[in-house]
């Protein structure tokens, strides 16, 4: 587990870039943290690392947006998911199992439906607006 404190959005974005640079085709990044914690900012950093320059926004209403970079980026936001079971009904298996990168905001809403091989990123809002970012790589995989 890797933990960092960021002081502002730019530093959070840099942490996203750092993780993004280490990602391999097919990787899944599962983000969790309160509203406004910085999940979308972090995702913007991952997108930048993949060579995507368009602005990244939360696909809260569409649930999924797709960006073309060095590899495809599938950006999901499960805020509006009713139950974990609905995740299976979204038809995202092809994305999760494909050659792109899947980044999932509000991934905790997928519960047990979330693939075990996901890299889990937890962002906490600390005092003074600082953010604590914890990155948990799945068992048996080096960071
Ligand atoms: N250390 C920090 N890291 C990330 N965002 C921060 C930080 N400090 C302040 N912010 C602000 O918090 C907001 C995070 O928004 P966003 O990434 O959309 O959150 P989420 O997707 O988790 O709801 C932005 O307005 C950003 O400027
Ligand atoms: Mg968001």
Image (cartoon, rainbow, N blue to C red):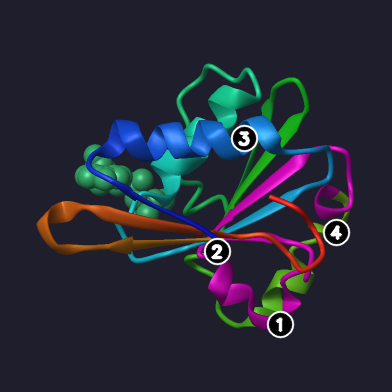
Mark nearer the N terminus (2 vs 3) = 3
Residue 92 magenta:
no
Between 67 and 120, which is closer to the camera in this rendering?
A: 120
Q: At numbered mark 3, what does the secondary structure look like: helix, strand or loop? A: helix
- How far apart are the two marked residues, 2 and 3, measured between alpha carbons? 21 Å
Mark nearer the N terminus (4 vs 3) = 3
Mark 2 = which residue? 78
Q: Looking at the rendering, which quadrant does residue 24 occupy? A: top right
Name the front one of labels 1 and 3.
3
Magenta-colored span: 95-120
Mark 4 = which residue? 93
> For residue 112, which numbered disc appears in the image?
1
Mark nearer the N terminus (1 vs 4) = 4
Name the front one of labels 4 and 3.
3
Mark 3 = which residue? 20
Residue 57: tell me if it is visible. no
Question: Dots 1 and 4: beta carbons under 8 Å?
Answer: no
Mark nearer the N terminus (1 vs 3) = 3
Measured as percent of width and height from the top left, residue 105 is found at 52, 57
Farthest residue to the left: give it.
Answer: 128
> Within 10 angstroms of label 2, few (less than 14), some, or many (20 or more) residues?
many
Mark nearer the N terminus (2 vs 4) = 2
């Amino acid at each position: 587990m890797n933990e960092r404190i960021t002081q502002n959005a730019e530093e959070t974005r840099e942490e996203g870039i750092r993780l993004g640079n280490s990602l391999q085709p097919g990787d899944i990044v599962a983000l969790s943290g309160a509203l406004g914690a910085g999940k979308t900012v972090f995702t913007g950093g991952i997108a930048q690392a993949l060579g995507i320059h368009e602005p990244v926004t939360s696909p809260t209403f569409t649930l999924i947006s797709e960006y073309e970079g060095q590899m495809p980026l599938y950006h999901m936001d499960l805020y509006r998911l009713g139950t974990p079971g609905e995740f299976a009904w979204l038809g995202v298996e092809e994305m999760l199992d494909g050659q792109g990168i899947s980044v999932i905001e509000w991934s905790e809403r997928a519960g047990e439906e979330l693939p075990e091989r996901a890299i889990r990123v937890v962002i906490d809002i600390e005092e003074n607006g600082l953010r604590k970012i914890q990155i948990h790589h799945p068992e048996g995989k080096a960071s």
